Image (cartoon, grey):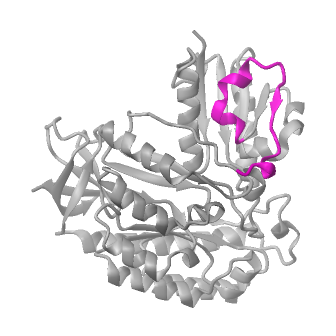
Amino acid sequence: MKKFYIHTMGCKSNQFESSIIEENLEQNGFEKVNDVSNADIYILNSCSVTHKSDNEALYLLRAAKHKNKNIITILTGCIAQIEKQKLLEYDFIDYVIGNDEKLHLYQYLSNDKNCQVNDIMTLDKFNKVELSDTTKTRASLKIQDGCDNRCTYCIIWKARGKSRSADIDFIIDQINKYAHHGFKEVILTGIHIGQWGKDLNLTLLDLLKEIEEKTTIERYRLGSLNPTEITDELLDFLKNSKKFCPHFHLSLQSANDKTLRSMNRFYKTEEYLKQIDKINELFDLPFLGSDIITGFAGETEEDFEITRQNLEKSGLTQIHTFPYSQRKGTIGESLPDQVPDSIKNQRATIVKEISKKKYSEFIKKNIGKTTEVLIEKHRDKHTNNLKGITRNYLTVQINSDSENLYNTLQQAKITKFENNIIFAELI
């Protein structure tokens, strides 16, 4: 029996697709191992958001081949899709498999052709693949792929193709299968889930209404959304939903209008700050995450100061930030007034400090509150406490010896925040 090791980089869609790859191989007689030194096959499911991620992927593949010259190396994911045949020039890469092809990876291993990457821009239909992994506590379901936006800093649309939606019947069926297998929560993922239904003359709200009415799952969570996609109608529906977890992740990228225009983002800072305030008013302690890029081309000290001030006053809970990385093949690469790396990093550090403060304040607001917690199937590795996630996306620990609580929904009171751990007690 051949053994394989898989390393996943990047987004939740990649994580979901790696689970698909694992099941695909295991169903065809391969064994998954957790140590590359024990593997016959090394699979790298890559991310291509930045040059750093490209370089990291090549380093990992080279290192795997160096440790074991006989290991078969497979590069898939976004780098494979963009670079294609060029990658086979490296003697440490044996197979290059595209983003759509990787969902049926096994069938390509018996093929003599080492590069299996079709033109993803020609794809019009969502590739419906089923995942039945029951080892995790929360299920993920990819409902959409591709992106029709053309942000100047981003190359992912070239790696993922046009926006393509899974049909409602497939999604409902998958969610109900998850519920049947005992899952209490599903996370709806995709490259740009706010574009779900665009190719079907439907909207994300249409889908969520169906999920509310036709599934038995108890909780669902949404992936990242653009501010323009969170309409008043959507918010009103989510406010009254019995299944929705009040957790929003907003793909903001900047809090300065000049920078947003340069990025080709079609909204204004003041608009989404008001939207954040509305979400905080409508929901009881909702988790509001976001993405911010620092040091995009042309971002002056004054521009960043505006971003800093807007983030400080915003009602965000947490900010995922990273310094801008020039990406070959994007408009952003050729824009004038590129910001030095040292300044990008300084600005990212400032935003991280803002995020740390906001997150800490959010946790303090939750102390003393009673909330629903989904107890995970595995205890915390360091403390051996029960671990669980609240509806508003806080990971809490509970001191209990009970094993009957795994994968159950429990009421718990959040008691304290100590040593970076949020503690709760069962009611």
* Residue at image location 57% in from the left, 48% down from the top: 13
- 163 drawn magenta: no
* Residue at image location 80% in from the left, 59% down from the top: 327
Tell whether 95 sits left or right of 228: right
* Residue at image location 47% in from the left, 61% down from the top: 207
Residue 197 placement (x, y as % from top left): 59, 62
Residue that protrudes farthest toward the top in the picture:
1
Residue 82 placement (x, y as % from top left): 81, 47
Quarter holding the C terminus is bottom left
> Of 397 and 153, which appears nearest the observer?
153
Quarter holding the N terminus is top right
Residue 160 placement (x, y as % from top left): 72, 52
Q: How many labels sit on residues?
A: 0
Residue 330 placement (x, y as % from top left): 83, 63
Is any part of residue 215 visible from this angle?
yes
Picture quarter containing residue 5? top right
> Of 6 and 122, which appears nearest the observer?
122
Does residue 281 lie above or below 197 as drawn? below
In the rendered structure, which segment of residues is drawn in magenta? 99-124
Picture quarter containing residue 392? bottom left
Tell whether 141 sits left or right of 299: left
Is any part of residue 381 visible from this angle?
no
Does residue 389 lie above or below 344 as drawn? above
- 113 drawn magenta: yes
